[in-house]
Image (cartoon, rainbow, N blue to C red):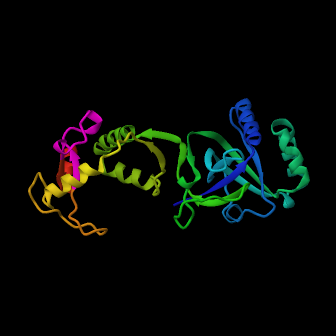
Amino acid sequence: MNTALFFNGVPEEVLTEILVAQTARAGGESFLQKESRIIRPLEECLPTPNSPIRLYVSTAKRPSNICYTAEIIKWEDKREMSQHRQNEVLLHFERFQPNERGKFLQREKINLITIRNLRSVEIVLPISFLSKKDGSPLGKMRSPGWAEVNDSGDLITVETEETSNHKLANELAVAKNIDAETLQQRLQNAPKTPEPFLIISRGFRRNANVIIVVLKRANGICERCKKNAPFHRKSDGTPFLEVHHRTPLADGGEDTIENAVALCPNCHREAHYG
């Protein structure tokens, strides 16, 4: 997965100032100042406007939640900036982020990070939603601080599962009618790593007793095709069957053994899509 960064405990007033400036200029660049030590992932993989690094942000008041997202498009070590560049940054602070000017002059925080498209997330998620580079969930950390994480997508883009499937179905319908040469060209131009996004779905709390009784009733045999389960679970060695509701719960079906049937994966998929 692509690398992203998480900034923990950013003061709300800093973010509010940036949002106000963005609104006034209909976009534009803003600055964050971080840490007395260099943020190595930014130094080693310099972000650019054409190759930004995604940023997730928690606030000082909500350090355990992802509250904002943005794009990092530039990183600079303030100690190595030319006088001309310093004057440019100071002019920006005076006009758009006056509360940050003092920090810049003090040189206490040496990382100057240029960001764009700062936005609050629609659904506030715990920081454990993010994963570290080794795949483990991001845990509690000192505030303020930062962490290198895997890119979990633009949390602004929130879709229902139904909407996501509908979009894919439309794209499939278009792709079916494209000639082979154009299809190959589109494959070559397409990004190899898909962009992740957040899916919201409505679920139902299933009755565990119903599941167990139905599976025991089936005794390892699909109640539709009457064949043995195709394999056994690694966890406990039981035959792998899936409990399906004849009348879906989303359509008002009851979570009862009378409305449930144990199916092999193939029959289960056929029941939904056949």
Residue drawn at (72%, 55%) of the image:
143
Residue 248: x, y in percent? Answer: 24, 39
Magenta highlight range:
242-260
Q: Is residue 163 magenta?
A: no
Q: Residue furthest left?
A: 226
Tally of marks: 0
Q: Is any part of residue 22 visible from this angle? A: yes
For residue 14, what is the image quadrant? top right
Left or right: 86, with 165 as reference point: right
Quadrant including the C terminus:
top left
**Measured from the top left, where is residue 69 in percent x and y?**
62, 45
- Residue at (88%, 56%) from the top-left corner? 107
- Residue 101, percent across and down? 87, 44
Q: Residue 227 in the image: x percent, y percent?
A: 10, 60
On screen, residue 171 versus residue 27, left or right, reads left
Is 109 left, or right, of 24 in this rendering? right
Question: Which of the two residues, 165 or 205, is positioned nearer the viewer here?
Answer: 205
Q: Is residue 174 above or below residue 142?
A: above
Q: Nearer the viewer, residue 105 or 180?
A: 105
Q: Residue at x 63, y 50 (%)?
A: 64
The answer to whether residue 270 is above or below residue 19 is below
Quadrant hosting residue 100: top right
Q: Dividing the picture into quarters, in which one does residue 21 lie? A: top right
Left or right: where 40 falls relative to 92: left
Q: Is residue 259 inside the magenta stretch?
A: yes
Asked if residue 273 can be seen in this view, the reply is: no
